[in-house]
Image: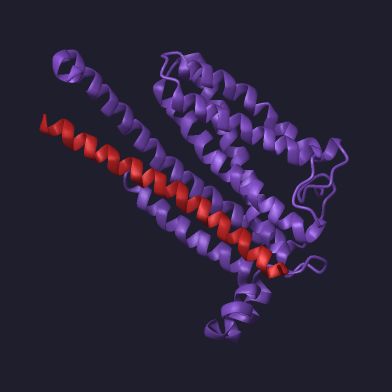
Amino acid sequence: MSGNGYLFAAYTVTWIIHIVYLGTIVSRYSRLQREIEALKKK
Amino acid sequence: MKRAFPILGVLTALLLSYALCMALMPVVHIFWGFTVGTVVHIWGFNVGAPTEQTMGDVQRIFYYHVPSAWTAFILFFINFGASVFYLIKRKPAADIVALVSAEVGVVFCTIVLVTGPIWARPVWGIWWTWDMRLTSTLVLWLIYVSYLFLRRFSSSGQTPTLAAALAVLGALCVPFVYFSIWFFRTQHPQPVMGGGGSIDPRMLHVLLINWLAFSCFALLVCWSRYRLEKLQRDVDQAHALESLLDPRGSAR
């Protein structure tokens, strides 16, 4: 791999880690919203 | 407070785009520059970070690696402060701040541990070496991962107190990681600020802008995560109350 290949690998991995983490926050939030809706219905 | 959230979001987006432009501009030009044009190329070389003479463009990993490490250290110190405050005052808000800062800190520390070997391979010829800086950073990461595991899988009422005690011990590792390159002979380069290191002022400028952008991003994520955790605890409390009022219904 060339120097630029390593550079783009590092940048890609960084943003994948951030996006995956943000994705977990969004999924936890939507699960919580469903729980709140279920609680409101009771 | 609610109005500040979108303002911080816009500021973070602007800072991140500007910081990335400054860090990557000449390389971006190499790959996609024909669409951006020569003006950006000239601007990139004059305003953005210059290419390092020995390592070439791969050195630009520095603009992610170092700000991520600094941001992780700040978050671990926030975790330390919030944990000490929780141990003294027993405020649930301090416990939430501790949890959130540790979680986001682990994300940034993971980036440091991943980008480090990717940078080391072309420069040192190896992915990893068990020297003091690298090993102590891995140990720091493991301490905070164990902290998060404790928070996630223990349902005891004493969990926040135990986690706060672990966080206080974990925070002691942070100065050790930072100063390890001063006190031990390591493969890792000397610090760029203080400790006798020197850096081109344009590189330093880009580094600091990147750090500011990463810090704003971390603050934004922490804020979102804090609100989510608070909401989660409210919902858990509502579930507990519901099962108290209707024990047969919750048993079904």
Which residue is situated farthest in the right direction here? B185
B74 sits left or right of A33 in the view: right
For the rendered model, the colour scheme is by chain
Q: Position of residue B167 (x, y in %)?
A: 58, 25
**Residue B120 horizontal/vertical position (percent):** 75, 55
Figure check: B159 above or below B19: above
Q: From the rendered image, report the letter of the chain displayed in red.
A: A
State whether residue A39 is above or below residue B168: below
Residue at (54%, 27%) from the top-left corner? B147
In the image, residue B49 above or below residue B66: below
Quadrant of the rendered image containing residue B121:
bottom right
The outermost residue toward the left is A41
Q: Residue at x 25, y 19 (%)?
A: B240
Q: Nearer the viewer, residue B127 or B36?
A: B127
What color was chain B assigned in the picture? purple
Q: Image quarter for residue B58? A: bottom right
Relative to residue B48, is residue B91 drawn left or right?
A: left
Task: Answer left or right for A19 relative to B105.
Answer: left
**Residue B60 horizontal/vertical position (percent):** 68, 63
- Does A15 sit left or right of A3 as displayed? left
The quarter of the rendered structure image containing the N terminus of chain A is bottom right
Total numbered labels: 0
Of B87 and B164, nearer the camera is B164
Q: What residue appears at the point 57 percent right and 68 percent down from the top-left corner?
A: B21
Q: Quadrant of the C terminus of chain A?
A: top left
* Viewer-proximal residue among B28 and B213: B28
In the picture as drawn, the residue positioned furthest to the front comes out as: B252
Residue shown at 77% from the left, 62% from the top? B200
Where does the image place residue B102, in percent across and percent down from the top left? 53, 34
